[in-house]
Amino acid sequence: MAPRPNADRIKVVTDNLRTESGIWTRESETLTTMAASIGGLKFNRTEAGLFQAFVTVHSELVEAASSRCKEGSPAFINTGTTLKKVADTYDEEDQKYAEQLKDIW
């Protein structure tokens, strides 16, 4: 059986999980901003000029990219929330059982 990780090692791991949680949450905002920016790339037939044949395909591509960013934003928030919850749960469980386990090793 591997030795039980010490409190410092556990803190490093749970702090890393919390840091990652913050990154996922911040990047969800980036995806929201990107969705709006991508939406601004659409152009109409007048703007397309000689490239009329590409307007429909281009618009569909812009809409698809924007939609994926909109879908990704809440998924990133959920990932961040889950990582934080895992870290919190790990810390709570470790603290809860520390007394019971301290004399085992």
Image: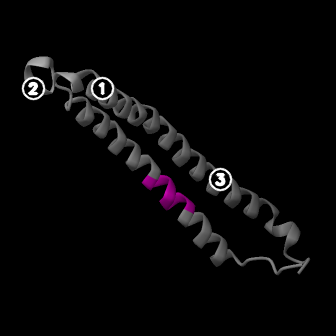
Left or right, residue 37 beside residue 75: left
Q: Which residue is mark 2?
A: 50
Dot 1 falls on a residue whose secondary structure is helix
For the residues labelled 1 and 3, say whether their Cβ atoms are less than 8 Å apart: no
Of callouts 1 and 3, which one flags the residue occurring earlier in the amino acid sequence?
1
Boundaries of the magenta span: 17-23
Q: Which amino acid lies under the numbered mark 1 shown in the image of this protein?
A: Val
Quarter of the figure with residue 29: top left
Q: Residue at x 47, y 35 (%)?
A: 74
Q: Which residue is mark 1?
A: 57
Nearer the observer, disc 1 or disc 3?
Answer: 1
Quarter of the figure with residue 47: top left
Of callouts 3 and 2, which one flags the residue occurring earlier in the amino acid sequence?
2
**Mark number for residue 86?**
3
Left or right, residue 82 beside residue 98: left
Front residue (pair 2, 97): 2
Nearer the observer, disc 2 or disc 1?
Answer: 2
Q: Position of residue 93 (x, y in %)?
A: 75, 58
Q: CA distance from mark 2 to mark 1?
A: 15 Å
Q: Which amino acid lies under the numbered mark 3 shown in the image of this protein?
A: Val
